[in-house]
Amino acid sequence: MRNTWIRLVVSLTLVLSLSGLAMAHRDVVGLELSAYFNNDGISYEDDPLDGDLNFAWQSLPAEQLPESGEVVHFQNIWFLFPSKEDGRLNNVAAFNQRIHVPHDNYHDIFLLATATNGPQSETALLEYTDGSVQEVALAVSAGSSRPSNAEHVLLSTDYLHGSVGRIEGATNLFVVTIPVDSERILRSVVLPENPNIHIFSLTLGLSPDLVVAEEVERWSLFAWSDAVGDDKGPGSYVYPGHEVFKPGTFDIAGVSLLESEDDYLVQVEIAGPVENPWGAPHGFSVHLLHVYLDTGQDAGTVESVPGANVTFAQPWDRAVVADGGWGSEIADFLASQVPNLAGQIYLSKAAWVEGQTINISVPKAFLGEYSSDWGIQVFMLGHESDSGSMAGAHVRRVVVDTGADWRFGGGDNDPAAPNVIDMLTPIGQDQYELLSGYKESGEMSVVPLIYPSR
Ligand SMILES: [Ca+2]
Ligand SMILES: [Ca+2]
Ligand SMILES: [Ca+2]
């Protein structure tokens, strides 16, 4: 099975609807939910207790369901069916999970869902990138009942597996639609606390006005939101004073990892504008991005790429450095400074900006085959080609003074202080605390990788 999010982009079609001219589209983002799965609701007949959908050891018969990883179509949308194999979790029993989505304008969220122990009616939260939160109804009919007016039956089984054999009677998996405010950019969905609501698949409908036709099909593997307004490193850093450093331009709002047939794509969404005052080939000039991955390929290291000035809580084995495409200077520097890591650091050769998103293409061979066990971390640093002691690393320095035109301020000149302006933070941890953890003794701050499936 393709252990991924899926994004399919199909060209727009104009159709006449009864209400006049409307735009029909099939642009749908499918979210692979396996990192959120917490319930096994499916079993095969030869092991009917490998599954407990309703907390009474009853489960859906695998024999009557789509194949693991199959794409199941409904009208203009589709769902990725989870793994139904023995020992695998295959649905999200709602328990206050916060599900991160690729930041975008959506018109609807579509769930493939069923309810156990009667119909369930709750409230979910939609969180938007502007900080607003919308309460929406999440009502799912009991699997044994007919759909409500707002639902459609997509899949149905004739019986359930129970502890003493088959329990006859249909169980339905419904398509449940949650309308989204397409004017705002959605970042996450918070489910209610009601494990009788079971979600097997989740698909997002992209708002047609904002659909950009793409030639390349990309599957989204991972998405993580970051706080807006935390572009202060350990909490005290301020931007250089010169007007090219626009407010919010070093503020990561979210990171997605996508895959196509040809490459991986790291998308870093920025809270502020991404401009190119010095005309860098890749469309951004003031930024330097470090992407660290634990792909399980090699032993890895806990040191950062020179210049970031932190250490890692878990070893990474692949890093991508993206600098706007100025040439090979950083790669040459790294090859001489950290020859042991040279094969594990890739200097971006293809990157581009779309709106407020920096896209970094990474060759497939460099990262290997994706698994949901991968860990990731992304650092935002300032780029500077002539930065004194860090000349080769091209990292813009952080100094004590605030108000200097070309240096970040609010630092303390401790040689162990980080040069990271923003980074991703695991749930329950605090970026300012993590980045303030360095010591006068020279010990650097310890920063975690994000493992979405842990
Ligand atoms: Ca099972
Ligand atoms: Ca941020
Ligand atoms: Ca952050």
Image (spheres, rainbow, N blue to C red):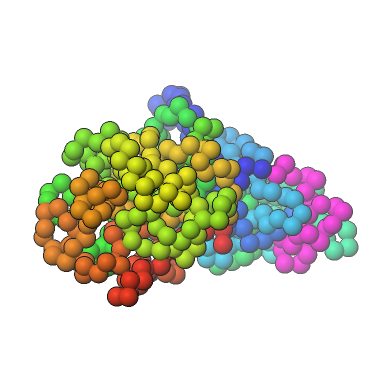
Q: Nearer the viewer, residue 156 or 80?
A: 80
Task: Report the magenta stretch's main SS.
Answer: loop
Question: What range of the chain is rendered magenta?
Answer: 43-68
**Total of numbered circles in the picture?**
0
The residue sitting at 72% across, 67% down in the picture is 55
Classify residue 208 by image quadrant. Answer: top left
In reply to whether residue 270 is colored magenta, the answer given is no
Residue 250 visible (yes or no):
no
The percent position of residue 36, horizontal first and vertical second, equals 57, 58
The residue sitting at 38% across, 54% down in the picture is 305
The residue sitting at 14% across, 53% down in the picture is 406
Using residue 417 as the reference point, say whether residue 313 is left or right of it. Answer: right
**Which quadrant: the C terminus?**
bottom right
The percent position of residue 432, horizontal first and vertical second, equals 32, 69
Residue 3 visible (yes or no):
yes
Classify residue 53 by image quadrant. Answer: bottom right
Q: Nearer the viewer, residue 355 or 302?
A: 302
Vertical position of residue 372 compared to residue 365: above or below: below
Using residue 383 as the reference point, say whether residue 306 is left or right of it. Answer: right
**Which quadrant: the N terminus?**
top right
In reply to whether residue 53 is colored magenta, the answer given is yes
The residue sitting at 18% across, 63% down in the picture is 399
